Image (tube, rainbow, N blue to C red):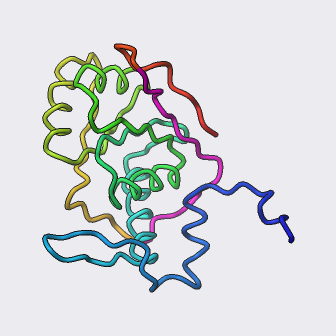
Amino acid sequence: MDVSQLLEIKAAPRAVFERLETHRQRVRFQVRSGNAWVPVTWGQFAQQIRGVARWLIEREVDAGERIAIYAPNSVAWASAALGAQTAGAVFVPIYPASTPEQVAYILEHAECRFVFVAGNEQIARLDKARSQMSRPVEAVALEGASWAPDAPIGSEGSIDLRAASGGAARPGSPDLAI
C-alpha cells in the first residue's frame, strides 16, 4: 500500500476545492428544511466557503486574525470555519451552550473582531456578552446568509484555535491546533 499521499498535511479548505473537478455535482450534505431534506453539493459548499472568504477579505481581515463562530453545527458553520481558513484567518469555535460570561471571555481573550452567530439562544447570549465586553465585536448572522461566489483562495498555513472545555468557571487557555 502506497502511503505517500498521507504524508502531506493539507488544510481542510484545500481538500474541498481539490474534489471539485470530480465531485462538483455530487451531494456533500443533506440539510433538513421542514419535513424535507435539501441536498447541498460539493460545488455549492465550495461556493459558500469562497463567499465567506471573500466577505472577510473585503473587510480587510488580516492573516492570523481571529474570527469566532458561535452556532450549532451546520453546513453554514462549516462554511464559516473553512471560509475563515481560506482567508488566512484563525477560527475560534465557541460551544453553543456557552454562557454570556464565557462567550465574552473567549471573544475578548481571543481578540475577535467578528463573530458568526446562528440560533436564537446564541444570539440572545451574544447580546448579553457584548454588553459585558470592553472591545467591540461585530456579529454576523449565519442563517440566511448568501455569500458571494468565487472569492480568491489561499488555504495554506491556516490554523484553528479551540477553547478547552472542562469544569472550570472560565474556559481554559486556548489550545493552538496547527
**Location of residue 36 (image quadrant):** bottom left
Q: Quadrant of the C terminus?
A: top right
Magenta region, main secondary structure: loop
Q: Give the left or right position of residue 129, taking residue 19 as reference.
A: left
Q: Horizontal placement of 160 versus 43: left or right?
A: right
Q: Give the number of callouts.
A: 0
x 49%, y 34%: residue: 162
Left or right: where does residue 122 sit relative to residue 86? left
Residue 105 inside the magenta-drawn segment: no
Q: In which quarter of the view is residue 64 placed?
A: top right
Residue displayed at 48% across by 36% down? 65
Q: Nearer the viewer, residue 55 or 24?
A: 24
Foreground residue among 97 and 25: 97
| Residue positioned 21% across, 57% down in the render | 143
At horizontal 21% and vertical 17% (from top left) the residue drawn is 132
Q: Position of residue 169 (x, y in %)?
A: 34, 13
Q: Is residue 138 above or below residue 131?
A: below
Q: Is residue 47 left or right of residue 5?
A: left
Point out the stretch of residues depicted in magenta: 150-166
Picture quadrant where residue 114 is located:
top left
Expressed as whole percent of the image width and height from the top left, the position of residue 145 reads: 24, 60
Image: 24 above or below 53: below
Asked whether 153 falls inside the magenta stretch, the response is: yes
